[in-house]
Image: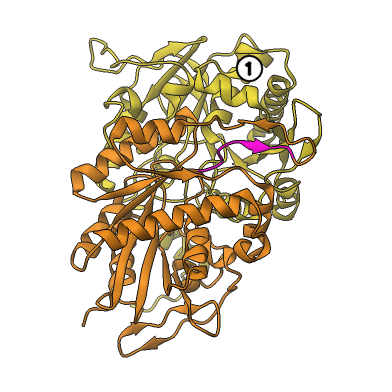
Amino acid sequence: NDNLAQVQHVVLVLSGKGGVGKSTITTELALALRHAGKKVGILDIDLCGPSIPRMLSVGRPDVHQCDLGWVPVYTDAEKSLALMSIGFLLDDPDDAVVWRGPKKTALIGQFVSDVAWGELDVLLVDTPPGTSDEHLAVLENLKKHKVDGAILVTTPQAVSTGDVRREITFCKKTGLRILGIVENMSGFACPHCSECTNIFSKGGGEDLAKLTGSVFLGSVPLDPLLSASIEEGKDFIQSFPHSPTFSAITSISHTLLNSLQAA
Amino acid sequence: IPLMGVTHKALQERQRQQMARGLPKQKPITGVKQVIVVASGKGGVGKSTTAVNLALGLTAVNPSKSVGVLDADVHGPSIPKLMNLKGNPELTDNNLMIPLTNYGIPCMSMGFLVDDAAPIVWRGLMVMSAIEKLLRQVNWGSLDYLVVDMPPGTGDVQLSISQNIPVAGAVIVSTPQDIALLDARRGAEMFKKVNVPVLGLVQNMSVFQCPNCHHQTHIFGSDGARRLAETLGVHFLGDIPLHLNIREMSDRGQPVVVSSPDSPEAEAYKKVAAAVVRRLEEVST
């Protein structure tokens, strides 16, 4: 029994650096892909900070099992977006998950193999930052099925690109195809006077792509409307269809889909 | 033999002793008076930037104190970049690593031991052994404070450090957003579980002021960390604003406390340092 057999594409969302917006970008890409008519799943394996349930406003649902394994939580009646997160399995989502390696890797193994996704066009896997036990566990478990590749998220500044550069090397060494780099929080436009300030710098992600011979998928600006939307668990794509942030995310999702379908 | 006459308390004590067997013994780092860990639940909230500027703030607030920085983020070591330090540490005659120093602050980081582009893909045991090395095999000399920059999360490294060395207190960094606060709350709980006093919360990226029109935008929400501190019953150590200067100087490896000492950003860090000193005195009595 292979629960990933009817999943067309599996994409890991990685970063070497914490706090660059992996979960935000994962959620936004999922929403954009759904907007484009695709059936999408998200596997949230950030054991220490599972953010996705909140970003999609699914609260604390009960998780059920069926013959094939865990039943994912659907965000809507049409079942166009499915989610499985460690956050669902904690008694109190605010509990500290203070586990050592072996316990984590065992859980990840279960998560990767035992969720009954059914038919999906794309499964996005949100990972914790770094290159630790969790990542190795994910890769080892996914390799038994298939993985199309990874998207790397970075912010433009040096401390981020430095860490993400390590992550790129990790991908190359483990034979994980790099689908491209996303530069998040790229420039901030003052809502009052429109002056753009590069709080976290600009261009670092694009430079990193050139330096490492990777595809640059695009930049997403620092947008308080997006952070507020994510905070409240709202669908940014539906709320702000005319914003530059929306165009940026949509463009990235198109490029991603094209490269997944071309391969 | 029936356990009559053995009190509940004695049983509890016996249980505690049995559980403690097998756990590492807590031993202070030679020469270091007080260890302050800078942690968060969430990545990217500015732990390393805060740790570096806190260390420099501690010396600014009291120039007679000696302060060191230990970068315990084995997978994503940022301290070398932030402190403009590079190179392999030399060894003393008895094989202790000599910290690299800048701005009067001796530093040690995994970043000094590996290539810039090399991923540090280690499983738990190797990470623990690296942490052990960073804790015990560094020639710190005599330090009043050792500021430890922790990795994000509530996992192996945080546990190991809390179990191996006595920690005077933990500073938890968060941004105002709820998503960061949830993780900060988990971080605070973790320290309670391992009996490390929480000195307080720092609210980083509190507000952004447009350099052009001075309009203030709360990009990452507002006051969340302050409210969380109240809810958790921990102290609020201060706000650090989002200022272009902090990031620009950080990218150049010139922390704002030394590169722009009179700026409001530097003042904000120094205020936090002063609050940390006060809280350390409070928790040690």
Q: Quadrant of residue B73?
A: top left
Chain letter for the yellow part: B
For chain A, the rendered hue is orange
Residue A233 position in % (x across, y down): 63, 65
Placement of A260 over or under A70, stated as above or below: above
First to last magenta residue range? A184-190
**Front residue (pair A109, A19):** A19
Q: Dot 1 corresponds to which residue?
A: B257
Relative to B190, is B111 on the left or the right?
A: left
The C terminus of chain A - image quarter: bottom left
The reply to whether residue B76 is visible in this rendering is no
Residue B189 position in % (x across, y down): 57, 54
Q: Which amino acid does the dot numbered 1 rest on?
A: Val
Residue A255 position in % (x across, y down): 40, 54
Please give the name of the residue rendered at 41% of the width and 63% of the height, measured from the top-left corner: B15
Q: Count numbered badges in the picture.
A: 1
Placement of B103 over or under B82, stated as above or below: above
